[in-house]
Amino acid sequence: MNYFALRPLLTKLISTTETQIQIYESGKGLTLSEAQSFSFIDIEIWARQFLQAVDDFLLQFLPAGAANLETKRGTAIPDAPLDAVERVVLAKAMLAKTIVDGIDYLFQVPTDSQELARVREGLAQLLLAGLSDGYGTDTLFETSAVLAYVHGRPVPCMGGLPSAMGRKDIPVPLRFFPALPVLLAQSGTPATLSPLDLPQARQWNFEFTFESQSVDQDAIYVAIRFDQAGTLIPEWLAAPHSSLFDNLAQFVQVYPAIRSDMAKSLNPDDPDYQAVEPAINAFAEIAERVANSWAGHRREANVGTCAVDHATTDFIYRLERKFSGESGSVRLDCITLNLVENAMHPTANWPSLCVLASDGQYYKLVGEPVGDDKRLYTYNAALSWSDGSTIRFGLEKLDVFQAQMVRAGVSVRRNENLSYDPPVKQEFVYHTPTQTFAAPCTPSLRQPALIDIGRQITDLKETLSQFFAVLLETAEVPPSVKLSIEYHYEPEYDSCSAPESARVEIALPVLLLPPVAYKKDLGANVAAETQKWWKDNTPGKPGYFEMSVGVIASSNIPLLTLSRVTFSIAECGVPLPRQAE
């Protein structure tokens, strides 16, 4: 079975700065022009408002069901307004013909010219009865040689059709621009507060929270890039406007005043009539302009490009949601995450997903693999999902040297997921610009946990060289390293006079190294300076060395600080360092 739908006038938003709009003056009509600006306009909304206005106009000035205007001759309506009504009727006929030409196959299937002609004729009859109702048709299809119409369904597939129609689900595309996603917060935190080794100490978790007021026809795209500079997405440009946009802009700016004047008395002897005739003529003029420009509107601008620049992106995920229940008690069933693009970056963990529940808390979804490039996340909490819009997206256990910065972006594509085989024609698919944070997320990890690298070390040069080699083994570009070393010990106390709580630990400065570019001899140099200090300043008390190490990226961003790296040499004795409070 083939499905048909009206192609959207434009699948992008329009912005202008110098659109000429004629001023409407009561009793005079359209007069002088002035330049006005418009930002990110969905032309479909204006078009629907205009078509409803045409229907309302004809309903007001023609008797219900009138086939032509000749039946109005000889009534009290003067000739001048009647001429304007005829102009609107002709504009309606032109609009119906032009709108019908926008009917197309919804999916990429072989064309059938006869079937397409029948569907267009059926919609033409519907448009002549009422432009607004006809234009609101979402899907058309034939079953048993009967043309069926689907109107305004909020879900992508309408169910419950009689079995005689041979179909249970009907795809329902939407023809208005999706709401833009809103980014709420992002953070980079250590993956663990008690790392067991240096690889764990390097790991961090990236999370960002976004809100998307999307519907079932929408697929949310999350793009991730790991880099040190540059942008995730090229600047998004609004679609070029057309004469249809200009004429619809003229309509929306003056129609409220025109409608107010048209509601006044049609009796020529009434003083208010002086405002009615110019209003009717102004509306007729606008209707003619819109009808003529609609016919010439360039639909080829609809074939949109992908909102994500794959060349600058490491991962792209498509996120789809499914709900159950009726309005007022809708709950989330699951989220399907598809890996669309993978640039083989070293991190390959599937993300974590949390959703905001009605109690204001975030609940983590349980993910299960469905093939190599797909994962199903189920929502098992008893609480309903508050409004179906707020999601926390996380990448866990990132290596701080391989993922020094993370840029995340969110976009929405509408009507793309009505079917995957055959695919929806691109003329029906809306793409929002990708929303990104003003700055990327950088972790700047600080690890206060104790990391002990050796007791009674006899070869300090080898131990420290191995420490720095393991710590920085994943850094592709040599970073800068700064460090400080202190020697810690406790004075001798009289056990009878000094309780444990009153004891203190003395820290003597050993070495302070400002940021230097990392080289393989760093460990040997630090060992030599430490041993020299011990030789020159032997405290004579058993203790240990505590080293603070900071790693700085080539972009001068602090990436990782280990504040409690401890070790002791053979001469120090073997006291254990105090645990962090």
Image (cartoon, rainbow, N blue to C red):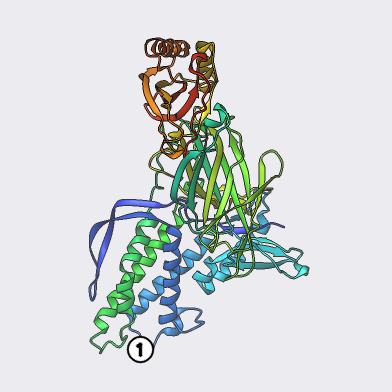
x%, y% of residue 216?
59, 58
Up the image or down, 576 lies above or below 317; here it is above
Find residue 83 and report its image quarter: bottom left
43, 225: nearer the viewer? 225
- Residue 305 can be seen, yes or no: no
Residue count near mark 1 (Cα–Cα under 10 Å), binned few <14, some 14–19, many ≥20: few
Measured along the vertical axis of the image, is residue 188 above or below residue 197? below
**Residue 323, quarter of picture:** bottom right
**SS at mark 1?**
loop
User: Which of 6/558 is in front?
Assistant: 558
Q: Along the horizontal axis of the image, is 280 left or right of 364?
A: left
* Point 50% across, 34% down: residue: 579
Residue tagged 1: 76
Q: Quadrant of the N terminus?
A: bottom right
Q: Choose between 45 and 407: the one closer to the eye.
A: 407
Drawn side of residue 509 relative to residue 273, left or right: right
Depth order, front residue of 122/470:
470
Circle count: 1
- Would you place residue 205 above or below residue 280 in this image? above
Q: In this view of the protein, can residue 81 be seen by the observer?
A: yes
Seen at 54% across and 27% down, the residue is 198
Q: Residue at x 74, y 70 (%)?
A: 162
Q: Amino acid at mark 1?
A: Ala
Q: Position of residue 185 (x, y in %)?
A: 44, 48
To which quarter of the image does residue 138 belong? bottom right
Q: Position of residue 495 (x, y in %)?
A: 46, 33
